[in-house]
Amino acid sequence: MKKEKLIVIVGPTGVGKTALSLQLAQQLHGEIISGDAMQVYRQLDIGTAKVTPKEKALVPHHLIDVADIDQRFTAFDFQQQGQQLVTEIISRQHMPLIVGGTGLYLQALLYDMTLGSAQDAEQNFTIRQKWQTFLDQHSEADLWQALNQIDPQAAGKISATNPRRVIRALEVYETTGTLFSQQRPKKLRYDSFIIGLNCERQLLYDRINQRVDQMVAAGLIEEARLAYAHRETSPQAVRGIGYKEFFPYFDGTGSLETAIAQVKQNSRHYAKRQLTWFRNQIPVNWYNLVEQPEADLARIQTDLQQWLQQ
């Protein structure tokens, strides 16, 4: 049976994903599904780099502003709603474009992953919170050591500086009883053409720093203050980069300059982790629209046409 086709656009912040997605969606009668775990939340607009109302009006967008800050929206929710949206978009003879990069969410949508029911998601969340609390009280090295004792093969492939991935490996073991390193290979659910956008490392970091300054000028601090007000009731939404770093400033225990510098640093580290994940977990076709926009846009168009004709 022939698999349904969809396009995925991934990459760190500031490399042209939004502009490319709008261009391709208009060209291919497409509809865009946000693949970002934070863009589902209403009122968190600047720090999550949502499309503007003007951009959103150009083509249909989905899974943006579908949950309140106090609601929990899991990978299971994303998988179920995302797959339903793909089916509906294809039934309209439109092209689904998944844009953005929360690794687990993309994996859940693109692969035949079984994430379990809402009840299972609740159990997973409890386990995740347990290890998050452990991390809060210890160090990243201690957290990694806990995984190393259980699953040294997985620990050998996951950096101690990537606590989210370490916690995910611990969570998988506790919920399934199977070591993270022994999870069976997953098959792609769709015929996916995955576009990865990137540029030279220092240029990327400079663009990320500039993007953070633009967000601060656009009102990021007030948005972070809203997240801070919901920190007790919204453990998922307020953990996003661009919000949590301001909490010491609001508490009076840190300076605004330190908070902004921390947002930049965490954003750079996150971009590095994203790129590592994309390279290792999904089959990506890489392009550079920052440094060679004309040549690589032409490459994308050619590669896409070949894929569409297959």
Image (spheres, grey):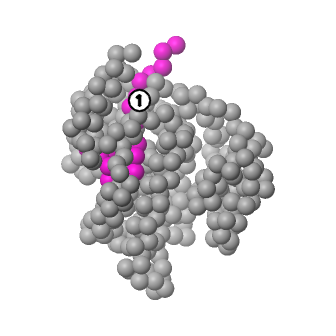
Of all residues, the one furthest to the bottom in this rendering is 252
Q: Let me know if residue 39 appears in the view.
A: yes
Instruction: Give amino acid for label 1.
Output: Phe
User: Does dot 1 land on a helix, a strand or a loop?
Assistant: strand
Residue toward you, 132 or 82? 132
In the picture, residue 116 is in which quadrant? top right
Q: Position of residue 307 (x, y in %)?
A: 37, 21
Using the image, determine if residue 146 lies above or below residue 216: above
Residue toward you, 43 or 188? 188
Q: Let me know if residue 215 appears in the view.
A: no
Report the residue marked by disc 1.
193
Q: Residue at x 73, y 55 (%)?
A: 147
In the image, residue 28 lies in the stretch drawn in magenta: no
Q: Residue at x 23, y 46 (%)?
A: 55
The quarter in which the C terminus is drawn is top left
Bounds of the magenta span?
A: 1-19
Q: Position of residue 6 (x, y in %)?
A: 40, 28
Using the image, determine if residue 220 lies above or below residue 192: below
Q: Position of residue 226 (x, y in %)?
A: 41, 70
